Amino acid sequence: MCALEDVDAATERGIVVTQPGRGWPTTIATLTIGLMIALTRRIVELHNVVKQGQWKKEKYAGFIGRDLIGKNLGIIGFGEIGSKVAEIAGTLDMKVLVYDPYVDTSKILKAGGKPIDLEQLLRESDVVSLHAALTKENEHIIDEKAISLMKRGAILVNTARGALVDESALCQALSNGRIAGAALDVFDEEPINRDNPLLRLENVVLTPHIGGVTIERKQTQITACAKEIHRFLTGKIPENVVNPQVLKKQNR
């Protein structure tokens, strides 16, 4: 989807902006779970050990990971993606804790989650996973204070927006062992700056903002874009308009 400033510019010029549907929640959710597993089972580190020719148990004993089964998963933001993560986590027998003041508690309970406040979620979660939209209110929702509330040994996963996390505070917590690790698909600055201290840490798994990108998803996007253009050119209203106020003005 376009950046917000691009959408605003198009709206000012009376240009309709559409997007290729909402097919990515499951795609992002599966990456989120994959990052949790990669981090807790230390897959990247073990992969490197094997490629270096090491195999005997005494060589990789220091890289033994942890199970997710039975652990508390704290989800911040319970929209389509957060709820899909909860669904998949349920199959791993994880206990799902949810903080989202904008979602009715009945929806959270129906999904098998437990609605709680942010502080309680941070204190009780073994894994904290971010799925909130970025707003002025929740920018750096994970800051030094929030991290100080997290369990020692907990991990943080962010496949939402980089600015939800204070990267300086996160780097410090990862460096001094305040939390065990972090898996990130999004960053404050993208592409990530080569001087970013996250790149020098061993207890992180990093991906280049590809949460919603797979071969299948790309093919779906192309088809969806073509259908939206066809609808517009044949006088029909596109199904996934981002700035409907433009259409209202055109229909006056």
Image: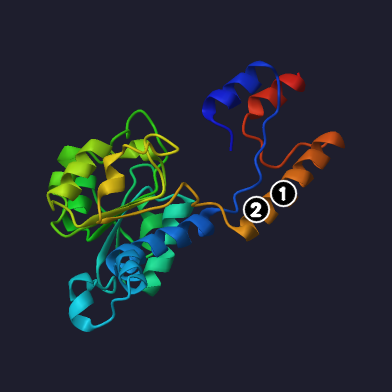
Question: Is residue 15 positioned above or below 43 on the image?
Answer: above
SS for dot 2: helix
Evaluate whether residue 233 shows in this view. yes
Q: What residue is at 44 percent from the left and 36 percent from the top?
A: 190
Outermost residue to the right: 234
Task: Residue 113 in the image: state x and y as whole percent.
Answer: 33, 61
Q: What residue is at 12 percent from the left and 49 percent from the top?
A: 176
Evaluate whether residue 235 shows in this view. no
Residue position marked by numbered label 1 in the rendering: 222
Answer few, some or many: residues within 10 Å of disc 2's Cα (few below 14, many 20 plus, some between 14 and 19). Answer: few
The mark found on residue 218 in the picture is: 2
Q: What residue is at 48 percent from the left and 55 percent from the top?
A: 28
Q: What residue is at 62 percent from the left and 34 percent from the top?
A: 242
Is label 1 in contact with label 2 (beta carbons under 8 Å)? yes
Occupied quadrant, residue 244: top right
Q: Left or right? Give the position of 24 relative to 164.
A: right
Along the line of sight, which residue is nearer the eye, 99 or 146?
146
Task: Residue 93 in the image: state x and y as whole percent.
Answer: 32, 74
Task: Residue 124 in the image: state x and y as whole percent.
Answer: 18, 58
Answer few, some or many: residues within 10 Å of disc 1's Cα (few below 14, many 20 plus, some between 14 and 19). Answer: few
Along the line of sight, which residue is nearer the eye, 233 or 195?
195
The quarter in which the N terminus is drawn is top right
Along the line of sight, which residue is nearer the eye, 179 or 59?
59
Along the line of sight, which residue is nearer the eye, 170 or 102?
170
Outermost residue to the front: 53
Q: Which amino acid lies under the numbered mark 2 shown in the image of this protein?
A: Lys
Q: Left or right? Give the position of 37 relative to 215.
A: left
Q: Which amino acid lies under the numbered mark 1 shown in the image of this protein?
A: Ile
Q: Left or right? Give the position of 126 relative to 20.
A: left
Alpha carbon separation for disc pair 1 and 2: 6 Å
SS for dot 1: helix
Question: Is residue 29 positioned above or below 194 on the image?
Answer: below
